[in-house]
Amino acid sequence: MFRGITKRWLINTFGVVLAIIILLVVSLSIAVESYCYGTIENNLNLRNQELYSVFPDYLSESTESFEETAYLFAEDFAYKDKVEVEIINAAGRVIVTSSGYMIDDSEEIPDFEDAVNSESSIGRYKGKLSSGESVMTLTHAVRNYSGTAVGAVRFVISLKEANHKIFLYTLIAVLVGLIIITAVALSGFYFIRSIVKPVSMMSDTSKQIAQGDFNARVEKMYDDEIGDLCDSINDMAHELDANEKLKNDFISRVSHELRTPLTAIKGWAETMQNGVPDRITLEKGMSVIVKESSRLTSLVEELLDFSKLQSGRLTMQMEKMDILAEVDEAVYMLRERALSEHKHLLYDEPEQMPIILGDRNRLKQVILNIIDNALKYTPEGGMIGVQVYRDFVDDTIKVVVADNGCGINPEDLPKVKDKFYKANQKINGSGIGLAVADEIISLHKGTLDIESSVEVGTTVTISLPIYHEGDDDRDEGII
């Protein structure tokens, strides 16, 4: 129970509060004791000042004169109910008390010795009598004109009431401190529980998610930072669940994509193995094998690129290049396919374009992928337009591929560049081509933007920064 956050709270917060409360209680007790004892000491000093009127300058002519005067002082003392006056002779024996009770001769009077031996003629004592009663005393030695002590007047106040008051106030302080500590402990444990319980639930749910249970959810108990964390974990689980489904769909699609060309290649190879077909059949079979082999090679390369992208090993061989050459070659490579599929691939090549810094093969791969997608999603008789122009506003070269195909649903459009995502399940494809293309363009410090409307068409715009003389040549080479 007392571990983790709870342990840190006990040490850091509760421990500090406990120390402060103890310090306050001790300080209050000392302050009360100091006040009570100070009041008693002041009372003793005031009573001592009354001796001025009895013994001028605290002097007496003789022992007999002292004892007679002191006896009368004790007899007429006005504060007998609070302060006891004891008259002590020169031998240190109590001869008269204001209460009438005589003191045992065996009772030690240390303050008398202090008063006799002190230059101020005053001795003080705080302690217990032989009876066990706590007292505070002030003894004033009275001397004759030659300086010899002829006796002393001792004022004695019991500390019983003061000690009782000190104990009472200390007890009240301790009780208040305990109430405060209890309140802090209860509120603290409630607060810690409000953190520890959700955190424990989140920990358990996270373990379930880590073990593959993406349907696990954390119950949101509070609308605060803990609640936000619960929402984040639930959102993470939802995204992981969605990604898991996409991954499974991706594996299924890739398996199908691999199986289709392999089946065609194997079938035609077995046909040729069973006997030499006629020339027309042979050419048709070889054409299918070559076409499906190219398709298989393209798919495998796409998967390899995606694997490199995932592991951060997708590299670019950057050099100064003319983007028009790569666009022209990509259009040339796919023009025959467009004609065979009865689609119009239009490209109006500009005369020249500024130089860019890029990887020729990777950029051609992206352009081929974009035009290939446009051909896939455009029906027979449809049009695919390719345009290259310079945008002077942001100083980039734009490569635009537009088609009038089926388009993309608005809810699918933000996700088409995500890995594994495939908006149209009816068209062949792995669903990772755009993810790879977007990463390649990002490594060129460019952007790949997609605009689409259902049954209207799709426009893909690639923006690549123009290279200027004086730009940092360190960008060239492998990145």
Image (cartoon, helix red, strand yellow):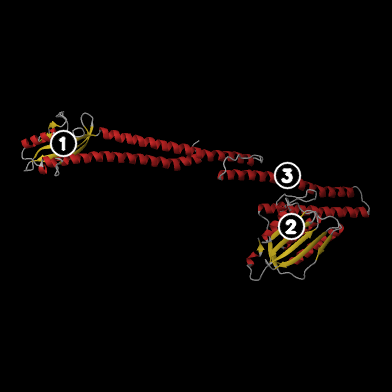
**What label does residue 248 carry, if any?**
3
Nearer the observer: mark 2 or 3; the answer is 2
C-alpha separation, residue under disc 3 versus residue under disc 1:
102 Å
Which disc is residue 451 wearing?
2
SS for dot 2: strand
x%, y% of residue 359? 71, 62
Going from N to C along the chain, the mark reached first, 2 or 3, is 3
Amino acid marked by disc 3? Asn
Quick check: can you spot residue 358? no
Label 2 is placed on what type of residue? Glu
- Residue 229 numbered tag: none
**Residue position marked by numbered label 1 in the rendering:** 154
In which image quadrant can residue 118 be found? top left
Quadrant showing the C terminus: bottom right
Q: CA distance from mark 2 to mark 1?
A: 108 Å
**Dot 2: within a 10 Å radius of its alpha carbon, few (fewer than 14), some, or many (20 or more) residues?**
some
**Relative to residue 258, is residue 371 depicted above or below?**
below
